[in-house]
């Protein structure tokens, strides 16, 4: 019997050793065939994968479910990285992809019902104010020192991530781990802007050079010039602007994604304005209590700069965009640029770079026969209310978020998957596929120096210090799902002509204050938001707030002289910094 037991133990050890060897073989295969290039050499990659093999052993055979929105980065994770993770660790991941609105709805539903719908989400860092207040998501700082300690990659290197400042709560703790990151920048057809005949005609009409617009006045002049003066290039009807206006949730995000602050509605401060953020919500310096969105409560959501921003969005969409753009949604409008009939777009997301560098054979009319982009990206222009020191634009930081309603063992397995898809072994290759950089080491990798000329300025932008002026929604927003859903309906009423921009923003600000007032009442005595729930200011006359640090008063001239910069000089400045 003793001999039998020893044989059984030995057999078990052989089987276990074989399983480890099989995992190592899978890791080697993926490293050799898929995970190149990398900032790690192959031995370092294998060592990192060996850590995953060992850490995942208790969860082998488990099947978990995660959810993200549909961009190329997440398609790669869903279609390729799940297979690699399962072969290497033995954990099966169902990585589902839905629209952004459906992802937010699923997060909200799981938080409200405490039912475990998904084991992890790639949830925008825009919800950091929500997660840090409601405490319904795992505090990753605490978990990495506690229940996640045995499943936290020693090579995670949080200091290498660009976006952790956006996923950190007012308490200084990390609630989300960045998975992909992209900015809204200015996009333009450099080949058209470089034409001597067009430069001469523009200079004659407007008195300054055709170039990258620094302010909204120049953007509007360029839009008018291409739509109404140039009209046709190489037999194609062309337009000076592209945007979208479909009455749907992503129309709201179109505005909360820093549109008001690009116009100048908020306060100075990075990553978000203090005391007034890009939503127009006020929160005093040193406080974590939102105090109101309406001008009469010290906010700026219905102030002159915000109203100006919405009016310009509506005017430009009506006057300078291609027919049908007003009925486009987010996913339809941005790829439409590849048709090659638009001169510029003020609000263009770098997440679509991967689609914009596809070859001509795939229907992309904005690259030449050799695949070189005819377009470039550049910093976003700002409106007349903008001041030096304000954020310039929006940066989306889709981040791994695990809710407390997920059982601990499933949360641990999901945390392993989240770290795997952002690991140094994988990240450079994933960045080449999706072009949504999250690590400094990846964007600075030599392979991107070699590829930079094909990416229209993306690499130069993310290597420059300027990128810090683009940031996500911050901590002033106390409950993102509840407040975000208000926006698209009000903005849709402007596009339909039912309300003026002022009327729509007055209603929007009032509704946001109503929601925050309900949160304040619910919080009284219950401490739902950890002491950081809304505490609304009493209403005062708008003129008082204009004079005392509230919304900016209306400018006598909202269209100052247009100003542009030379693109090549701009990129040269980035390279020197």
Image (tube, rainbow, N blue to C red):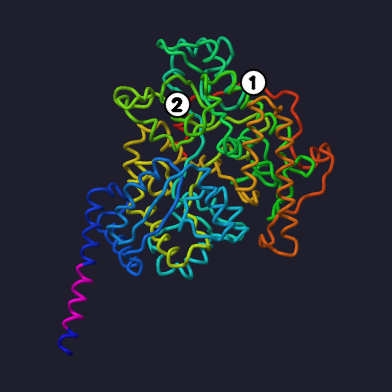
Residue 520, quarter of picture? bottom right
Disc sitting over residue 561 in the figure? 1
Task: Answer few, some or many: residues within 10 Å of disc 1's Cα (few below 14, many 20 plus, some between 14 and 19).
Answer: few
**Percent x, y for residue 135?**
59, 61
5 up-or-down from 163: above or below: below
Calculate the distance from the C-alpha at mark 2 to the C-alpha at mark 1. Answer: 31 Å
**Percent x, y for residue 65?**
42, 56
Residue in view at x 47 percent, y 34 percent: 331
- Asked which secondary structure carries label 1, the reply is loop
225 up-or-down from 486: above or below: above
Please give the range of residues in magenta.
7-18
Residue in view at x 34 percent, y 52 percent: 82
Disc sitting over residue 344 in the figure? none
Q: Is residue 133 left or right of residue 243?
A: right
Residue in view at x 53 percent, y 43 percent: 101
Q: Is residue 358 left or right of residue 529?
A: left
204 up-or-down from 532: above or below: above
Q: Is residue 11 magenta?
A: yes
Q: Is residue 352 left or right of residue 17?
A: right
Which residue is label 2 attached to? 336
**Percent x, y for residue 312?**
64, 26
Most foreground residue, 6 or 431: 6
Residue 489, quarter of picture? top right
- Asked which secondary structure carries label 2, the reply is helix
Most foreground residue, 500 or 496: 496
Task: Locate the N terminus by quadrant.
Answer: bottom left
Most foreground residue, 239 or 67: 67
Q: Is residue 69 magenta?
A: no
């Amino acid at each position: 019997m003793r001999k039998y037991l020893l044989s059984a133990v030995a057999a078990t050890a052989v089987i276990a050793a074989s399983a480890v060897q099989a995992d190592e073989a899978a890791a080697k295969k993926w490293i050799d065939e898929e995970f190149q290039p990398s900032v790690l050499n192959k031995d370092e990659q294998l060592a990192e994968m060996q850590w995953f093999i060992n850490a995942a052993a208790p969860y082998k055979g488990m099947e978990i479910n995660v959810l993200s929105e549909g961009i190329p980065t997440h398609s790669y994770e869903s279609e390729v990285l799940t297979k690699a993770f399962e072969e290497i660790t033995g954990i099966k991941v169902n990585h589902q992809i839905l629209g952004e609105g459906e992802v937010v709805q699923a997060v909200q539903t799981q938080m409200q019902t405490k039912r475990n719908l998904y084991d992890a989400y790639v949830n925008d860092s825009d919800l950091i104010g929500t997660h840090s207040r409601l405490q319904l998501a795992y505090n990753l700082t605490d978990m990495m020192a506690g229940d996640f300690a045995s499943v936290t990659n020693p090579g995670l290197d949080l200091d290498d991530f660009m976006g952790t400042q956006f996923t950190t709560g007012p308490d200084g703790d990390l609630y989300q781990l960045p998975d992909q990151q992209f900015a809204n920048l200015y996009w333009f057809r450099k080949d058209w802007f470089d034409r001597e005949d067009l430069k001469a005609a523009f200079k004659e009409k407007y008195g300054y050079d055709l170039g990258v617009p620094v302010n909204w006045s120049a953007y509007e002049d360029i839009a008018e010039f291409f739509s109404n003066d140039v009209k046709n290039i190489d037999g194609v009807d062309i337009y000076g602007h592209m945007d979208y206006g479909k009455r749907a949730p992503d129309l709201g995000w179109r505005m909360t994604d820093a549109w008001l602050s690009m116009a100048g509605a908020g306060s100075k401060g990075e990553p978000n304005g203090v005391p007034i953020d890009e939503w127009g919500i006020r929160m005093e310096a040193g406080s974590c209590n939102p105090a109101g969105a309406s001008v009469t409560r010290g906010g700026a959501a219905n102030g002159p700069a915000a109203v100006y921003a919405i009016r310009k969005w509506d005017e430009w969409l009506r006057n300078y965009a291609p027919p049908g753009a007003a009925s486009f949604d987010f996913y339809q409008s941005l790829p439409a640029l590849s048709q090659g009939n638009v001169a510029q777009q003020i609000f263009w997301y770098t997440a679509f770079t991967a689609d914009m560098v596809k070859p001509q054979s795939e229907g992309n009319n904005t690259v030449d026969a050799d695949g070189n982009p005819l377009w470039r990206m550049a910093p976003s222009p700002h409106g007349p209310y903008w001041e030096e020191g304000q954020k310039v634009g929006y940066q989306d930081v889709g981040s791994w978020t695990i809710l407390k309603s997920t059982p601990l063992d499933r949360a641990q397995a999901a945390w392993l998957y989240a770290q795997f898809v952002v690991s140094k072994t994988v990240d450079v290759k994933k960045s080449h596929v999706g072009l949504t950089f999250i690590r400094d080491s990846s964007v600075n990798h030599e392979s991107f120096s070699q590829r930079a000329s094909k990416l229209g300025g993306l690499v130069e932008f993310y290597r420059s210090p300027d990128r810090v002026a683009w940031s996500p929604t911050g901590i002033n927003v106390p409950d993102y799902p509840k407040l975000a859903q208000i926006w698209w309906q009000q903005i849709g009423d402007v596009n339909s002509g039912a309300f003026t921009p002022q009327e729509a923003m007055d209603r929007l600000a009032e509704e946001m204050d109503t929601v925050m007032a309900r949160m304040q009442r619910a919080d009284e005595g219950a401490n739902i938001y950890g002491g950081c729930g809304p505490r609304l200011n009493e209403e005062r006359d708008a003129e008082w707030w204009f004079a005392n640090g509230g919304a900016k008063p209306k400018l006598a001239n909202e269209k100052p002289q247009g100003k542009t910069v030379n693109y090549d000089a701009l990129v040269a400045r980035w390279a020197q910094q």
